[in-house]
Amino acid sequence: MASITRAMIRLPTSSIAFRAASRRSFTTSSPSILTRTRPSSRILLDKSNLQPNFRRTYADVAPVKKPRRFRFFKFFWRLTYISIIGGTAYLAYGVYEQKHPDDQFEPDPTKKNLVILGTGWGAVSLLKKLDTENYNVIVISPRNYFLFTPLLPSCTTGTVEHRSIMEPIRSILRHKKAAVKYYEAEATKIDPERKVVAIDDNSDIKGASNKTEVSYDMLVVSVGAENATFGIPGVREHSCFLKEIGDAQQIRKKIMDCVETATFKDQTPEEVERLLHMVVVGGGPTGVEFAGELQDFFDQDIKKWVPEISDKFKVTLIEALPNVLPMFSKQLIDYTESTFKEEKITIMTKTAVKKVTDKTVEAEYTGPDGKKTMQVMPYGLLVWATGNAVRPVVRDLMSQIPAQKDSRRGLAVNEYLVVQGTKDIWATGDCAVAGYAPTAQVASQEGAFLARLFNTMAKSEAIEQQIHDLSSSLNLQPGNTAEIAKEIETHERQLRRIKDIKPFHYTHQGSLAYIGSERAVADVSWLNGNFATGGGLTYLFWRSAYLSMCFSTRNRVLVVLDWLKSKAFGRDVSRE
Amino acid sequence: MASITRAMIRLPTSSIAFRAASRRSFTTSSPSILTRTRPSSRILLDKSNLQPNFRRTYADVAPVKKPRRFRFFKFFWRLTYISIIGGTAYLAYGVYEQKHPDDQFEPDPTKKNLVILGTGWGAVSLLKKLDTENYNVIVISPRNYFLFTPLLPSCTTGTVEHRSIMEPIRSILRHKKAAVKYYEAEATKIDPERKVVAIDDNSDIKGASNKTEVSYDMLVVSVGAENATFGIPGVREHSCFLKEIGDAQQIRKKIMDCVETATFKDQTPEEVERLLHMVVVGGGPTGVEFAGELQDFFDQDIKKWVPEISDKFKVTLIEALPNVLPMFSKQLIDYTESTFKEEKITIMTKTAVKKVTDKTVEAEYTGPDGKKTMQVMPYGLLVWATGNAVRPVVRDLMSQIPAQKDSRRGLAVNEYLVVQGTKDIWATGDCAVAGYAPTAQVASQEGAFLARLFNTMAKSEAIEQQIHDLSSSLNLQPGNTAEIAKEIETHERQLRRIKDIKPFHYTHQGSLAYIGSERAVADVSWLNGNFATGGGLTYLFWRSAYLSMCFSTRNRVLVVLDWLKSKAFGRDVSRE
């Protein structure tokens, strides 16, 4: 919105500037007209010189050169305001379009029921590309918004506000051509025999109808995964996860709670040290980004407002593998580790957490000689940023399908993402096992693939119906057969072309991670190779990449505003 | 921040425009120089006319008039950009100053301990004006931020985000000259005998030290009040209050929960009607503003994204008194009631809630004939926006002071806000009974009064000390007595002048309330009279008044951005 007002303020400005500029160009151009009207004198001068390359001799008057700099400046200035006007108009159009959806029509009730479970990366990417007029689409999820998870670590410290990375599913669905039903409920059981999903409204406010069944013809399971604690005692009770908005808000509150408790009257130095020790478990992008954001928050904000604890804040990152960010190339891992050293974040690799109590983490370090040493670390805040576990509803479905009995980490799917052992259930994202890493990128590509698949299926079914109709008319009226046969042939060719869908293939675009102190690392696929880079410029790339990946124009504007806000005012240190 | 970037983008723009403007003014001024160098011809012309009033005769050539319109336009344009530059620079300076506090010095430990309980209107207004170098100031509150309560109803629907109306107490204290201690804790007991306050860290994260005592020489009780339910059964269990940020967030979540539950599969029409019936109890400004915001949210946003329930949303406002907004003049009450009628908000006055269950409100209406009728209303969300009760810590303190035994609604204070029956305890705001309404305006003026009082006390004590020192020196060295006596006299005169503090007097500035549909009502004190107005222009006044009352530049910028955001993108319908 700010940008719109800016446009509104700017429009008269620019038009005035434009008038001024054109007036100026008129006056400055007059001398050039004059010189052009007297070409003869110039030629005479050249002729008297008799130098073919028109070099100036010492007797000639130096030609008055017009300052080129100003011309460039003028051009640059025009370019700037034209692109500002253009950009603002484009933005305003995007915002307007999003705010004013067209009327929707109700889909034909005789069409197939396509039920989609979830509102995460897989489901939303499917919904974005799906032609909803071909099906009766029903979306079921306990979370009525899509969450742009890559920016979740930024939410824990207030660099970005949580609502800026949420997009209401109602708004996403309202922009589809045909209406889509949405139920805010959790799918508790899938019955592939009866083809129904049991759903349960598990929010605070319940109506008379709060448990029911939804029948499907086609089902997409995109429910994601839940947090895994690997059976380590104390993790579920004492640590914070970092998967949903609520988690980020809880962490944000707890960081400030630790700081305020550390400054409580008569707190002992050991206790202050414990309270200001933040432990992050998991050296993947989430853990690394969170550790970086945490240190930023402390260095840039908390230190300033609560100076009495300025030298006592400490972040430790624990990872069981030999290094952090295993999906990145060696040089970037080294760069991350050296940056963390500068930022005073302690990295403990080859260290496995064994037990968590309310005030300590017990972790076992495996030395290069294989010797194991146990370490007990007192902590103030523990964030568990590792591990995916299968959700109960998925585990239950797997137990009903014999073909799934060897699958451990989720629903095994074939190359068309069909759940093995079923005919009309598909799965995407973290709840599907397709041989890829459990990332947003994979889920998003899987969702888009399913949308193409379903759109194609609807098209081919329509053509099959047409062929069927033509064939029956062929039998009924024996005249005109050649023409009808030809038409059938055309349709069949069309059908073959459509039906030739290639199986799902994942294209890795690259990996990105923010590592604190306005630096990032990026491992991007580039012309069949890899492009690895880290530093401040990569941070700008990280920002623009994430920005372009945001779901909507609204998200994009809000995230940019948040970045500017946290830059101008600092992050908020209120505990709320 | 957006404004800063705007400034940064704008600066070169303006300087170019400035250059262009100055160039233009140079060329346009040349004719006027020319006319001024030829005054004789003009005078001659006038003389030949022999008309004393210089009127033009028909033979004269019409003088060429320069187009005035452009001149005005130029002037206006210059004024605009100069004020934009000025405004932005002012804003940027404000933001810079807030972000870069000066170094603080530790106050002299021999000075008196001034303990302030609370971070609400009274406490923060006191802190803002207090010269902290005169005391050892200690602030104690379980809430580490100041909340701009007048905009809290806007937070329930997302017109304004909650962090925009919060100002961290750490930032407020960090800007004082001398350091101020802050403990995030709740005061559980005040002992006026031993002069100590017992405090308790009741947040989630506790340190080894979490309960202790703070001793005071002077104590200010600004803890506010808690919600009163008047003993009506079911209110505390089933309704939402609207006093703190957490309340607003809960309401925001519940509104969307009601909407989502109403669209759950197979919900009966009666149940949909119940779920979408929002009942507000309390016809004061909070209740009225909340009802208006709620209806706005529904009309402007929910309706669009969830079209299937568009005709089923209903807001009812219940008030026990004969009319809403009792502090406003009759015509504004009528205007509010007619506006609510237009907005389809039902007002039920002379109606007292008797019982609340999880799904119904039972209320008793007293007719004009005194006849009472009971009504049972099913509801989806119930907001309790009425009534203040004394907090336990205040009640406990009252029970210890014999002079307070007749006070029911809080600490009875004298005209200097000293708690009656004590010598060194002051009280402000909703926990003090000074004969004024429990409003932010009263609390704020009381806090400012105490700041003046304490600053004066410190000054007079310093002068008393000087007089004391001079008197002792008078006894020691009997020379120079006349001069010292004179100096003492000067000091004493100064002391009398300072000590002559007038008692607290409340100046009512006026009342404001938003009533929905971009209309507001205002009853403002104006030149010993009242100025009552309602409507769309008043809404702009309401906005600018609230904006100017915000605590900091940061708050102001954030609130404006939020207003623009909710205007451009609509309010967020995610349930979070």
Image: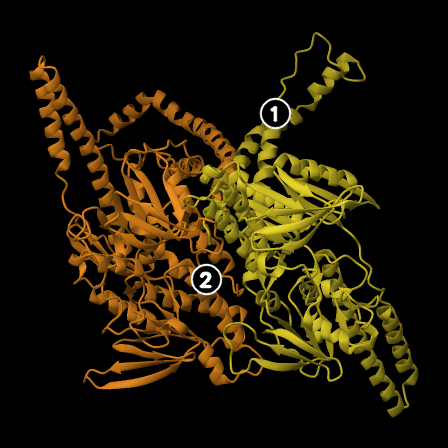
Chain colours: A orange, B yellow
Q: Chain of mark 2?
A: A
**In the picture, residue B422 is in which quadrant?**
bottom right
Up the image or down, B94 lies above or below A174; here it is below
Tell me if A159 is positioned left or right of A338 in this view: right
Front residue of B170 and B203: B203
Front residue of B129 and B37: B129
Residue type at numbered disc 2: Gln
Q: Chain of mark 1?
A: B
Tell me if B148 is positioned left or right of A137 in this view: right
Residue visible at 19% across and 84% down in the picture: A370
Give residue A532's position: percent from left, percent from top: 23, 59
Up the image or down, B514 lies above or below B67; here it is below
Tell me if A173 is positioned left or right of B221 in this view: left
Q: Which residue is mark 2?
A: A249
**In the picture, residue B247 is in which quadrant?**
bottom right
Q: Secondary structure at mark 1?
A: helix
Give residue B534's position: percent from left, percent from top: 71, 38
Q: Which residue is mark 1?
A: B69
